[in-house]
Amino acid sequence: MQTQIDIIKALQSISNSFFDFLFNAFSFLGEQYILVAIIAFIYFVLDKEKGELIAAILFSTTLLNNALKGIFLAPRPFEVDTEIINKRPNSSTGSSFPSGHSQIGASFYSSIYLYFPKKVFLYIIIPIIFLIGLSRIYLGVHFIIDVIAGISLGLIVAIILSNLYKKYPNYKFQIHLLILFIFTPFLFFYEDFNLFIKIGEDFYKGFSLLLGFILALYIEKRFVNFTCDINLKTKIFRFIGSLITALIIYVSLKFAFIGLDNIITTFIRYFMLSFITLGIYPFLFLKLNFLKENKKLV
């Protein structure tokens, strides 16, 4: 422990405004905003099926990470040693082990390579995963062991689920439901309860995103079933529209629930975010011919 603390202090001893900006940017690569944008691009522009599976891996690893955080309840570096500065307080909620950014980043970016196996992606993804982990140490919000465990678990989740989806391609929906079922018991271990497991708010965000995602996929496959085999202009409009839709939902519900911040409103907000963006949005714009199929590619 002391060795890890000394390493964090050594990294922070060379800190300056440039390094702070740089490592905050690296940390941002493992946060929800950039990941959601990438998923939307894959889902609406590149390949709907692969986008669905990458999203499923992302939500699953998020749930696992937050469940483990609730079990280990490990303190963060700045809580252990007051000389360590928390340089990213808005992304250091909950306990420390394993690192959420490291695990989520490793699962997400490695799953992109697993579904788009091109060497150029590998050369980009490996540095990204490493830099996300390093940034969390520099920023004083994780120990080295947190990062190593997070990256390892992230890669394991991505590989296992990717192979599972490939082996049972006709049972993807059932696998989604099974993952949801496995983590359902953790809903009852909220952090305010006096229990040995204390689940934080981030777990409820992940669970509601996965639930909304599963229901959205049912609606999309049952009533829309769009493809990416259309002209580039329409695909770009789809993508931009999805980002605008997600932003409107997130901001409007956050505004609607001002003064009512609790687990229930958090659950509703993130459920609606994935459910409407991935389910209702394609359905509504299909009716407006916004998702109209066009085989003339550009």
Image (cartoon, rainbow, N blue to C red):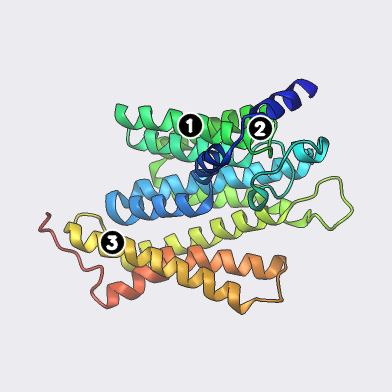
Q: Identify the residue at the far top of this view.
A: 3
Q: Is residue 32 visible?
A: yes
Judging by the rendered image, the residue that carries numbered circle 2 is: 12
Residue 265: percent from left, percent from top: 66, 70
Judging by the rendered image, the residue that carries numbered circle 3 is: 226
Instruction: Determine contact: label 3, label 1, CB under 8 Å.
Output: no
Judge whether 120 appears above or below 75 on screen.
above
Q: Tell me the quadrant of the picture where the N terminus can be found.
A: top right
Q: At 67% across and 46% down in the image, what residue appears? A: 66
Q: At 64% across and 33% down in the image, what residue appears? A: 137
Q: Tell me the quadrant of the picture where the C terminus can be found.
A: bottom left
Instruction: Determine contact: label 3, label 2, CB under 8 Å.
Output: no
Judging by the rendered image, the residue that carries numbered circle 1 is: 159
Q: Is residue 149 visible?
A: no
| Mark 3: secondary structure | loop
Q: Earlier in the sequence, mark 3 or mark 2?
A: 2
Q: Which three-letter amino acid code belongs to the residue tagged 2? A: Gln
